Structures are given as C-alpha cells and as structure tokens.
Image: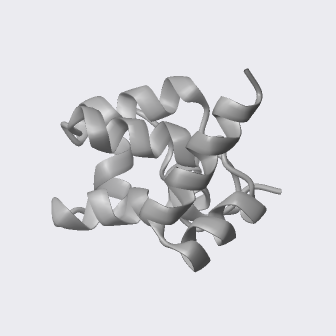
Amino acid sequence: MKNNKVGILLQDYRRKKYLSVRQAAESIGIHYTYLSRAENGVSEPSEEVLEKISTFYELSEDEKAELFIASKMSDTVSNMITQLGEKKAAEIMFRMSKDKK
C-alpha cells in the first residue's frame, strides 16, 4: 500500500503557487481529476507525470528527490520516519544498507 506523502507534497507545491487543481493540472498538461486523485492519495502519479510536475513547480533537486522517494515508499516506511523523526530514520536506514554489504 502506498502512503499519501506524495499527495501532501503535491498539494503543498500547488498551494504555494496559489493555484486551483484545475489551473495546475492544465498547466502541467494532465486532467484535473488525475491531479486531484494523486493529491488525495487515491492514485499514484507515474514517473513521467512526476517529472512534469517537478518541472512545472520548479522544484529544487532536494524537493524533486523527496517527491520521487515518497512515491516509492510504503505506509510502513512512512510511518517509521514520522515516528522516529527523519534524522533518526535516515541513520537507521544507512546502518541497514551498510549491513547488507
């Protein structure tokens, strides 16, 4: 199951530009219901659409990375990060990745 971190990020980016869902979707080149469903966690946008969104919102490399990583995370990982805090979760994941080598 996917989390709604992507949707939360998408809503945040859109609201910072003071755009409605319809206005943003039209500018991005997607149907407004597609964007609405993505923002509400009903569906996951494709990587192609995430790229279009990143370009339209002029996301920094860090913001873009956060969006693409969020699109790959499960609810379990997202909840772990929320509960532990981003720094602690990153430390644990880093240690786990070193242990696999």
Q: Residue at x 73, y 33 (%)?
A: 99
- The reply to whether residue 27 is visible in this rendering is no
Up the image or down, 15 lies above or below 1; here it is: below
Viewport quadrant of the N terminus: bottom right
Up the image or down, 71 lies above or below 4; here it is: above
Question: Residue 58: image x %, image y %?
Answer: 18, 37
Asked whether 37 or 16 is in front, the reply is 16
- The reply to whether residue 25 is visible in this rendering is yes
Q: Residue at x 41, y 59 (%)?
A: 9
Q: Residue furthest bottom?
A: 83
Q: Is residue 18 left or right of residue 31?
A: left
Question: Residue 72: image x %, image y %?
Answer: 65, 41
Up the image or down, 84 lies above or below 43; here it is: below
Q: Residue at x 28, y 54 (%)?
A: 23
Residue 33, image quadrant: bottom right
Residue 10, image quadrant: bottom left
Q: Residue at x 70, y 52 (%)?
A: 43
Q: Is residue 100 left or right of residue 38?
A: right
Question: Residue 28: image x %, image y %?
Answer: 34, 36
Viewport quadrant of the C terminus: top right
Asked whether 13 or 18 is in front, the reply is 13
Number of marks in picture: 0
Q: Is residue 76 left or right of residue 63?
A: right
Question: Residue 4: image x %, image y %?
Answer: 61, 64
Q: Please say which color scheme the image uses.
A: one colour
